[in-house]
Image: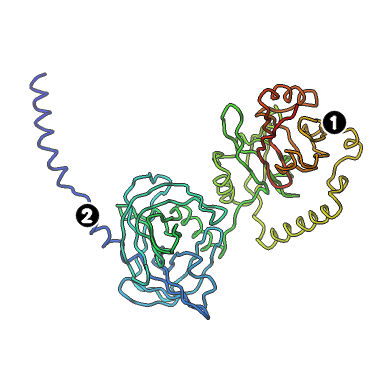
Amino acid sequence: MVKVWKYAALFAVTVLPVQAQVAEKTLEDVIEDVNSSVVSIVADTADTQALGAGIIVGADGYVVTNAHVTENADKITVITADDTEYETELVGSDIKTDIALVKVLHPNGFEPASFADSDSVRVGNTVFAIGNPFGLGNSVSIGIISAKERDIEKGPYDDFLQTDASINQGNSGGPLFNMNGEIVGMNTAIFSTNGQDIGVGFATPANQVKWVVSQLKKNGKVVRGWLGIGVQKFQAHNAEKKLVVSAMAENSPASRAGLKVGDILEAVGEIPLNNPRLFSLGVSKLKPETVLPMTVLRDTETLNLEVTVSEMPAEDALNDDKSEKTEEKLSEEEQIRSLERLGLDKYKVQNAVDFPQLHLKAYFDENDRYFVITQVDKDSDAARKGIEVGNRFVVINGKKVFGVEDLNVKIKEALPTGKLEMQIAGADNIDTIVLNLEP
């Protein structure tokens, strides 16, 4: 046994130096390898000229960049690392993710970059950017991944990687590489008070870029899945965070499947439920006609539903729908929020129960199992905090309420604290509101 151990030790000593000789590429080598896949973009409009960067994603001339770089451009020119200029045509752009795809008309020796799996990127990974800051084409800067899943309120599907690699005007649309020379993101925005780099840059993750590019290549636009619901984060008193349906479009896939505002999402296919924004992103990537299994909690009942995903309506259609609803709301305000036009049952309104500690009246809908508010005292805490006639609630202090007697019990239990937390559902959202109780 002793001889074998010594032999193993000797073998280890002789093999380690051999492994050490297989050195990874230096940063200089990696930059040299990928530099030719990065281009500068010049977008000319009638009045201005925009500068940006782009990534060659196909040897046949496809180049991806930011939509804000190419917006309203009459002419888009791609300039490669060897200063050759190419004419292009716009394949398509997606404003929601700020991604545009152009195609060089006569590509010559184009070397496309390769994409990494951006889901595997970790905070602290070393990265480097190549772009066209201030017209200085193919400039390189280095840094780390500072954070993931950033929402900077740029669009509905924000999911940015944050980096401290230097990003300036002209870097937009350029790549953010890992140390293997794979694209982890596309540089899109910076946080700055004066338009210059302060070490807070944001890149669209590679997986998002790849998906949008594939859609633009195939359709010239992005075809997204649509359920017709809005969701918000819901936190029960046991600290478990879930998503709750806060709004639903009429005649939407969700409404046809029997989903209701107030339903708590337990499972929706393979889509993560930890974040409303990422939930919407997951839904958007579903193909229309996909049959999506859903498990929801309604009151104390668990329901298993199936929703057939539709294609997201065009922006114009959505805007028209919003305009109609706005006009209807204004009409209701002019008529002092007519109870009948709010869809409230006249008989039920007449028999609503007064809850003086809350300074409101409400009736309990036995069919849908929630309270409907029919009156809110003027100048009350409830009115000041935005509670309105027609709002609904079913959750008090993190617990479901099952009727008038149950609500009175819960109010009585809360009196010593002087406060009561309500989940209030309006037409478009669900808000958590803490009311001051008056005995």
**Foreground residue, 352 or 140?**
352
Q: Is residue 62 left or right of residue 153?
A: left
Expressed as whole percent of the image width and height from the top left, the position of residue 255 reads 73, 44
Q: Is residue 297 above or below residue 183?
A: above
Q: Is residue 428 above or below residue 50?
A: above
Say if residue 259 shows up in the picture.
no
Mark 1 vs mark 2: give the one in front.
Answer: 1
Q: Is residue 81 left or right of residue 420?
A: left
**Foreground residue, 211 or 218?**
211
Task: Report the amino acid beneath label 2.
Answer: Thr
Question: Splitting the image into 4 quarters, where does residue 350 fall?
Answer: top right
Expressed as whole percent of the image width and height from the top left, the position of residue 90 reads 51, 71
**Foreground residue, 299 or 36?**
299
**Foreground residue, 392 or 39?**
392
Q: Residue at horizontal 54%, vertical 39%? A: 274
Q: Residue at horizontal 22%, vertical 54%? A: 26
User: Residue 379 has which mark?
Assistant: none
Question: Splitting the image into 4 quarters, where does residue 259 fall?
Answer: top right
Expressed as whole percent of the image width and height from the top left, the position of residue 196 reads 40, 63
Q: Is residue 76 left or right of residue 332?
A: left
User: Residue 26 has which mark?
Assistant: 2
Q: Considering the numbered disc 2 on the image, is that residue within a helix, a strand or a loop?
A: loop
Q: Considering the numbered disc 1 on the image, is that residue within a helix, a strand or a loop?
A: strand
Q: Is residue 187 left or right of residue 14?
A: right
Task: Report the amino acid beneath label 1.
Answer: Val
Q: CA distance from mark 1 to mark 2?
A: 75 Å
The residue singled out by tag 1 in the image is 353
How has the structure been colored for display?
rainbow
